[in-house]
Image (cartoon, rainbow, N blue to C red):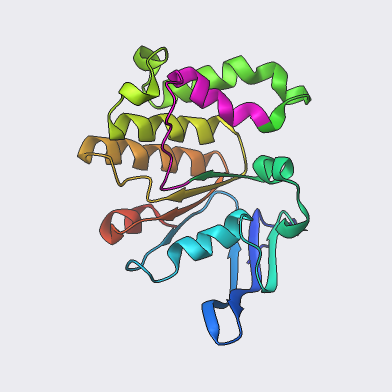
Amino acid sequence: MNISGESAPLELRGAGLGRGSEVRLRPTDLLFEPGTVTSIIGPNGSGKSTLLGLMSGDTRPTSGLVLMNGIQSATLSTTMLARHRSLLAQDTAVSFPFLVHEVVAWGRLAWRRTPSAGDDARIIDAAIESQSLAALRDRRVTELSGGERTRVHLARVIAQETPLLLLDEADADLDLVGRSHLDETIAALALEGRTIVLVSHDINRVGRLSQ
């Protein structure tokens, strides 16, 4: 329950997806508070990615509403969506040899021509440092391991500086050390007041993170 009287970073009000007899997601009510970590657990094909698509605003519900800070996500432009939420999707392949710092800088695109753009360099550097990528900042992303690429994209969504972060199996390509670092990052972001929603198969690990 939101007791502050302010709009939550993310709320689903009877949000569902389907046509006729084909139901991909039944009407769902969910409220996500600032500073919380919520995990979505389930087997393949259970609708996790469908639910995340609605939460991100990339998919419009066929019933109900998805609200971001009290605003219907369906009414937001692509740029405004990118200022409300950042998404680390499963498929983050980069086919061209962009440098690490260039990919992280993509997280700042939504803030062009705003007062926040003046802090871009500092924010990008801090995001790179948060994922221990300083030594790799001038490396081509195509030369990195799967785990290193995941950390680059995590730095990108951190640099986006949105109140809501959606992480779709961000731990898939990480080893034990990488997953431990990811958990520390998620916990730190939640302490900053950000709202985290993550999809994972590792119920024991994410159970400790979720609040």
* Nearest the eye: 179 or 90: 90
- Asked if one can make out residue 33 in the rendered structure from this viewpoint, the answer is no
> Is residue 63 in sight in this rendering?
yes
Q: Where is residue 177 in the image (x, y as percent from the top left)?
A: 23, 35
Tell me, yes or no, whether the highlighted magenta stretch contains residue 97.
yes
Please say if 193 is above or below 131.
below
Q: In the picture, residue 112 is in which quadrant?
A: top right
> Within the magenta stretch, is there residue 128?
no
Q: In which quarter of the image is residue 122?
A: top right
Residue at the farthest left position: 176
- Residue 134 in percent (x, y) is at 39, 15
Q: In this view, does 20 lie to the left or right of 136?
A: right
- Give residue 197's position: percent from left, percent from top: 49, 54
Q: How many marks?
A: 0
Along the line of sight, the residue nearer the viewer: 169 or 34: 169
Q: Which residue is drawn at 58% across and 68% down?
A: 30
Q: Is residue 23 left or right of residue 96?
A: right
Which percent across, then down, holds residue 126? 50, 21
**Quarter the N terminus occupies:** bottom right
**As displayed, is residue 40 above or below residue 198?**
below
Q: In which quarter of the image is the C terminus?
A: bottom left
Q: Is residue 100 above or below residue 160?
A: above
Question: Residue sitting at 78 percent across and 26 percent down?
Answer: 114
Name the residue at the front extreme. 95
Q: Residue at x 31, y 22 (%)?
A: 143
The residue at 42%/15% (across/down) is: 137
Q: Is residue 90 above or below residue 103?
A: below
Which region of the structure is painted magenta? 89-109
Is 171 on the left or on the right of 103, as rendered? left
